[in-house]
Image: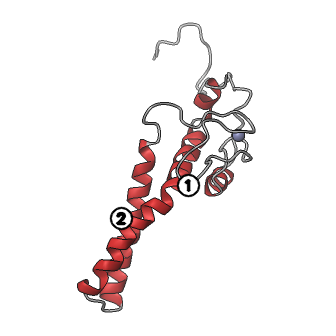
Amino acid sequence: MTDGNDGAGQGDSGGDDRTPRLAKQSGLGVTLGRAARLRCPRCGNGKQFRNLFQMHPRCSDCGLRFERGPGYFLGSAYINYGLTCLIMTLSYFSLHFGLGWSNRQLAPWLVAFCVLFPLFFFRYARSFWMGLDYWFDPTSFAQEHE
Ligand SMILES: [Zn+2]
């Protein structure tokens, strides 16, 4: 069975011999810890945010570019939305069916949660998005290092 590898002779490995010099893979726990502290996913030192909603363009320590392209952080909205829905659903079922709160009692709390939690979690959702992206594919980050 030929698969079109003319003369490459790489065997069946992924052919990952072009390891970028700055893309040292760290464990998922380390990466998520850096994301939870809103630090650079590569070095863990540079801060990602200059204030509540504005990011630094690059890591101040290693130079990693945070926003890699237009719409890069769109995926973080899925993290934020998904976690908001999960917490709200669990809260509703436990408070309504577990503790017997009526819908009228629950509604203002859940609406307030749906407005405030995504604002609070905005930075963390971006940080986890970038951290997971970096953990899954650090080579593409290293290619942008200039
Ligand atoms: Zn860094």
Q: Quadrant of the N terminus?
A: top left
Q: Is residue 124 above or below residue 138?
A: below
Q: Secondary structure at mark 2?
A: helix
Residue under pointer 1? 52
Q: Which amino acid lies under the numbered mark 1 shown in the image of this protein?
A: Leu
In the depicted view, which residue is nearer to us: 137 or 10?
A: 137
In which quadrant of this rendering is ligand 1 seen?
Answer: top right
9 to the left or right of 104: right
Say whether disc 1 or disc 2 marks the residue closer to the N-terminus: 1
Q: Quadrant of the C terminus?
A: top right
Q: Position of residue 135 (x, y in %)?
A: 60, 42
Coloring basis for residues: secondary structure
Where, by quadrant of the figure, is residue 112 drawn?
Answer: bottom left
Tell me the tag on residue 124: none
Where, by quadrant of the figure, is residue 79 drawn?
Answer: bottom left
Q: Position of residue 50 (x, y in %)?
A: 62, 48
Question: Which residue does the image show at 45% across and 60% down from the upper left?
Answer: 119
Image mark count = 2
Residue under pointer 2? 85
Q: CA distance from mark 1 to mark 2?
A: 23 Å
Q: Position of residue 53 (x, y in %)?
A: 52, 51
Report crowding for label 2: few under 14, some 14 to 19, many 20 or more residues within 10 A (C-alpha). few
Nearest to viewer (mark 1 / mark 2): 1
